[in-house]
Image (spheres, rainbow, N blue to C red):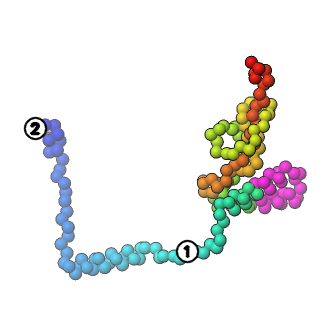
Amino acid sequence: MSWLSTRQWRQHKAFRIAPPRWPEAQRDDLAWYLNELAELTQPAEQEPVPTGDTLDDGSMATAATQLWRAQRKLAQGKPDSQSKQAARYLRTCAEALAEAGLTVQDHDGEPFHAGKSIEVLVYSEDPDVGAETVAETVRPAVYQHGRRIQTAQVIVAVPTADPEDSHA
């Protein structure tokens, strides 16, 4: 006897249960009860809630971009009571858009590489940078529930070319 066959003999035979033998009337009653239970457990069909006109991706991106620009403009000015109040309103608006799944991404100061999914408007030479860096975001990237609806537009600062290196 081989090893496999002795191993099989150590195991019990499959345990099988025969289907119940109920009278026809009891099976019909059981089927009726199961159908009733299925109807009770199914959620009631609800009519779709009218939402009116929905905003398209372009409108959402434009609103988010204008909000971003207003926040940046306020951050540049002198803080007074009116600008602080306006900043609070804008922050509340930004939080509401974030709760709706809208995310605005600013790229200022980030290192730049050719694989980034952003649109470069201008490359400007800057002696203060050691590597290609996003100097300014002209238009931010906007995402709705993780899906990009607007591509960022940026200005990239590149290191100034050394004139001695070009003549070598």
* Residue that extends furthest to the top in the rendered view of this protein: 168
Q: Is residue 63 left or right of residue 38?
A: right
Which label number is shown at residue 1? 2
Q: Mark 1 is on which residue type?
A: Pro
Q: Is residue 27 left or right of residue 134?
A: left
Mark 2 crowdedness (10 Å alpha carbons): few <14, some 14-19, many ≥20: few
Check the image and report above or below for 167 versus 143.
above
Q: Mark 2 is on which residue type?
A: Met
Quarter residue 100 falls in: bottom right
Quarter residue 16 falls in: bottom left
Of marks 1 and 2, the one in the foreground: 1
Q: Secondary structure at mark 2?
A: loop
Measured from the top left, where is residue 86 in percent x and y?
82, 60
* Residue that extends furthest to the front in the rendered view of this protein: 167
Tell me which residue sits at (13%, 37%) in the image. Answer: 2
**Does residue 28 show up magenta in the picture?**
no
Check the image and report above or below for 18 versus 69.
below
Tell me which residue sits at (20%, 67%) in the image. Answer: 19
Check the image and report above or below for 120 versus 159.
below
Measured from the top left, where is residue 156 in percent x and y?
74, 39
- Frontmost residue, 65 versus 46: 65
- Most prominent secondary structure in the magenta stretch? helix
**Does residue 89 show up magenta in the picture?**
yes
* Residue that extends furthest to the left in the rendered view of this protein: 1
- For the N terminus, the image quarter is top left
Work out how far the residue at label 1 is from the one at label 2, CA to CA, in angstroms: 69 Å
Measured from the top left, where is residue 123 in percent x and y?
75, 38
> Residues in magenta?
68-91
Which label number is shown at residue 48? 1
Quarter residue 163 falls in: top right
- Frontmost residue, 146 versus 86: 146
